[in-house]
Amino acid sequence: MPERDNCLTIVIATRDHPLRIRPQLQLYKQANFACPLIIADSGEAPEAAHVRDLAQGPVTYRSFEPRLSLCAKLASVVATVDTPLVLLSPDRKIMFPHAIDAAVAHLMRHQDYVAAMGYGIGFTLRDQTVDIDRVVVFTPTIADDDPLQRHYHLMQRYQPWLWGLFRRDALANALAAASAVRGYLFQEIMLGNAMVLQGKFARLPLIFRMEGAEQSLTTLKESDPLFWFADDPRSFFRHYIHYRNHLARFIAAQAIAVPAGTDARQLIDTLHAVWLNRNFDDGVLNHATRRLLGDAIAPLPTVRARPAWQPVGKGDVASPPKSPCYIWRHGVLNAEPRGEINISRDEQKQAERQLDTYLMYQVE
């Protein structure tokens, strides 16, 4: 796709892990990607020489203060981009070139779409076995013409839309709005809503990215509304009100009309109650309550537990013995809802070929 290199800039966000970028650059090199690449590093001592030589196209290396929020860092970077499309990528996730090309083609054909991505799939690497064990993001395309309907459908089944392909102008607008909000969780949600209010989201039936079982730098209390609420309800709602008011102002600034007789803030509150209802779990809340009452029970976790190893079972598909060996779990190949998640055998083979390259160059 020669036109891809003229319309796309790739932005890789990293923090003290520039070596993680090497295998991703090998994937791009193998796929003949020669588009501009910007490495945005929040590490203490950035060093780019060993990755510049691996890139096909021009590389810009930028250093940021570790305390700067992710949205503010990305906003600063995207403001310098000249191409109409931007791919946002972290150093900890594997972005697949074939799916990026499909997303670029989709946005070039459909001007009313502002974002495109495919499925996010999780795996656990154990020795030389790649255990593909979970579907992380999958919610369907949001294609309503009414921006408030799109806002509703995003929050009804919220999953993050941070790492994907975006139109630059809409992304710059959304990142500026998200940077004004406090708290990682609400910045992330503000970014998604500011994007979907500007245009449609496409979920392509392809594996767009894969992610390992490494622990996130963001704790559950920062990224999950249930755990934040359980830890400090007053802080949660104080941040929510700040976010809600910014979102209402963004809707007004975009000249999006709310239905007659409807208050924008009330609409946002009821929409987000749907989101919170889906996230709140009685067991976790009861556990937090018992802790507050003084019961001698374990504290709530601060990070998500890694998936436990399971032997190959009925419905799992294992590749012939080789290095690496791939196990596609039944829960991935037959994930629900079936009408929304469809990973073909050809797509599995594409993923395995690209993972072969990625893992060959992986440095721990």
Image: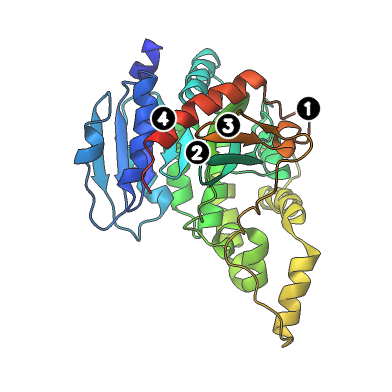
Q: Are marks 1 and 4 in contact (CB under 8 Å)?
A: no
Mark sitting earlier along the chain (3/4): 4
How packed is label 2: few (under 14 Cα within 10 Å), some, or many (20 or more)? some
Q: Please give the name of the residue rendered at 48% of the width and 24% of the height, measured from the top-left corner.
A: 100
Q: Is residue 258 visible?
A: no
Farthest bottom residue? 294
Q: Is residue 101 visible?
A: yes
Q: Label for residue 339?
A: 1
Q: Amino acid at mark 1?
A: Gly
Label 3 or label 1, whichever lies nearer to me, is 3
Q: Are marks 3 and 1 in contact (CB under 8 Å)?
A: no
Does residue 186 appear to the left or right of 172 in the view shown? right
Residue tagged by mark 3?
Answer: 321
Measured in 3D between alpha carbons, the distance from the residue under mark 3 to the one under mark 2, in whole angstroms, is: 33 Å
Specify the quadrant that holds the N terminus: top left
Q: Please give the name of the residue rendered at 70% of the width and 54% of the height, measured from the top-left corner.
A: 269
Q: Residue 348: x, y in percent?
A: 61, 25
Q: Quadrant of residue 69?
A: bottom left
Measured in 3D between alpha carbons, the distance from the residue under mark 1 to the one under mark 4, in whole angstroms, is: 29 Å
Q: Amino acid at mark 4?
A: Val
Q: Are marks 4 and 2 in contact (CB under 8 Å)?
A: no
In this view, the residue in front, 135 or 329, is 329
From this view, report whether residue 32 is shown above or below residue 52: above
Measured in 3D between alpha carbons, the distance from the residue under mark 4 to the one under mark 2, in whole angstroms, is: 10 Å
**Disc 3 element:** loop
Q: Residue 349: x, y in percent?
A: 58, 22
Residue tagged by mark 4?
Answer: 86
Q: Label for residue 163?
A: 2
In this view, the residue in front, 313 or 163, is 313
How packed is label 1: few (under 14 Cα within 10 Å), some, or many (20 or more)? few
